Image: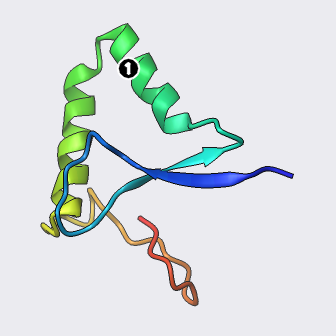
Amino acid sequence: MPRFTIKEIEEVSGNRVRIYKLFRDDHCEFDEFCMEIRKEGNLEAQFAVIQNRLEDVANMRLLPVSKFRDITPSKSRIKEY
């Protein structure tokens, strides 16, 4: 059975909300994605935009619905975006 854990994303500095990455059996897709972007180098600017938007969310700044949408199931207590 897979084992899931979470760890705070260190690259995102927010003082109101913490942003986490998900690990499945000690493997993180987010870390793999980050390494691939840095290795290829051609999407570095877009990756910086993603990190800036995550920081905006962590600092409770509003983003347009087209950039950040609530997809939480109706009866869930945990927010998903």
Q: In the image, residue 54 lies at what x, y percent?
A: 25, 52
Neighbour class for label 1 at 10 Å: few (<14), some, many (≥20)? some
Residue that sits furthest to the top in the current view? 40
Image vertical order of residue 21 relative to residue 29, above or below: below
Say whether residue 5 is left or right of residue 9.
right
> What SS does tag 1 mark?
helix
Q: Eyeballing the image, is 41 above or below 43?
A: above
Kindly identify the residue that appears in the image at 22 percent across and 61 percent down.
57
Which residue is label 1 attached to? 37
Quadrant location of residue 46? top left
Q: Depth check: give the residue in front, 30 or 41.
A: 30
Give the amino acid at mark 1. Answer: Ile
Position of 56 with respect to 66 (left or right) is left
Identify the residue shown where x is 49% and y is 78%.
78
Looking at the rendered structure, the number of numbered marks drawn on it comes to 1
Structure colour scheme: rainbow
Residue that lies at the very extreme toward the bottom in this rendered image: 75
Quarter of the image for residue 36 reads top left
Q: Nearer the viewer, residue 70 or 48?
A: 48
What is the x, y in percent for residue 38? 34, 16
Tell me which residue sits at (67%, 54%) in the image.
4
Q: Is residue 18 above or below residue 33?
A: below
Q: Residue 12, how many percent across, how many down?
A: 25, 46
At 60% from the left and 54% from the top, the residue drawn is 5
Residue 81 image position (x, y, % from top left): 41, 64
